[in-house]
Amino acid sequence: MRNLEIKNNDCHAALAMTKSVQSGRSMIEMLGVLAIIGVLSVGGIAGYSKAMMKYRINKTIEQITLIAGNIHTFFANQRSYADLNSNDKMTIIKKAKLVPDEMLTLDSDGNITAMTNPFGGNVDLTGFAHSNENQVDQGKGYFCIYYDEVPEEACIDLMSQDWSATGAKYICAYAPNPNCMSTPDIAVAQTICSNRTREYLFLSFDGTETFEHTFY
């Protein structure tokens, strides 16, 4: 009878040890699975962030191209772009539909209170008459499109684009003063964008004016 009790105790001990080993193995396996999930999650988040950045860059290119085309069309028969620098600028932008509706924030009266870009920053338009507007051969002046809060990666990509089809003469960023490019160059874009002191870009269209900026 005592021998049977001893054997039973041995069995219980062996069973307990087996359960302990299995429990330990299960815990290790669970930790391994969690580690794999963590790696996949980080990779997924990184992939999502990269995809969103690419989407916002492409959306910005689409918006600027559309806005520039709308401005050229609307002002085709006018002497200058100066109305884009007047007190009625927002009214003109809305009535002429110069900017896509998705970018506009309106108040209760339907007036534009803000124009927002895909990065969450502000958008602005300015226009100027030529310094000697009577000289028709010198054109009607120039206009600029400003995008604020553009991150460095997007800055490099956008400054490396060929904007000539939109009529843009220059694309500029502050590093620390306005630095402008007339032709795409990724190395120069990286230098300018990595040294910016303000997170906005602007494109200058048309005109023959010379700016007090650094050009590349």
Image (cartoon, rainbow, N blue to C red):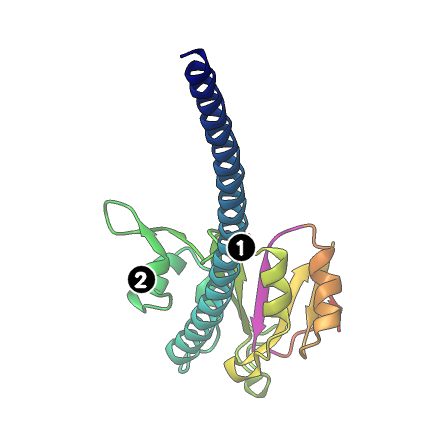
Count of numbered badges drawn on the protein: 2
Q: Quadrant of the C terminus?
A: bottom right
- Residue hosting label 2: 101
> Along the horizontal axis of the image, is 55 left or right of 74?
right
Q: Position of residue 15 (x, y in %)?
A: 45, 27
Residue type indicated by callout 2: Asp
Residue at 62% of width from left, 60% of height from top?
A: 153
Residue 175 can be seen in this image: no
Element carrying mark 1: helix
| Residue type pointed to by label 1 | Gly
The verdict on residue 201 being magenta is yes
Q: Which of the two residues, 115 or 125, is positioned nearer the viewer here?
A: 115
Q: Which residues are magenta?
A: 198-207
Closer to viewer: mark 2 or mark 1: 1
Q: Position of residue 168 (x, y in %)?
A: 57, 77
Q: Position of residue 135 (x, y in %)?
A: 58, 83
Q: Which mark is residue 110?
A: none
Q: Please report whichever mark, 2 or 1, sits nearer to the chain's N-terminal start.
A: 1
Between the C-alphas of marks 2 and 1, the distance is 35 Å
| Element marked by disc 2 | helix
Q: Residues within 10 Å of mark 2 (few under 14, many from 20)?
A: few
Number of other residues with Cα within 10 Å of mark 1, as a class: few under 14, some 14 to 19, many 20 or more: few
Which of the labelled discs sits on residue 43, or is there none?
1
In which quadrant of the rendered image does the N terminus lie?
top left
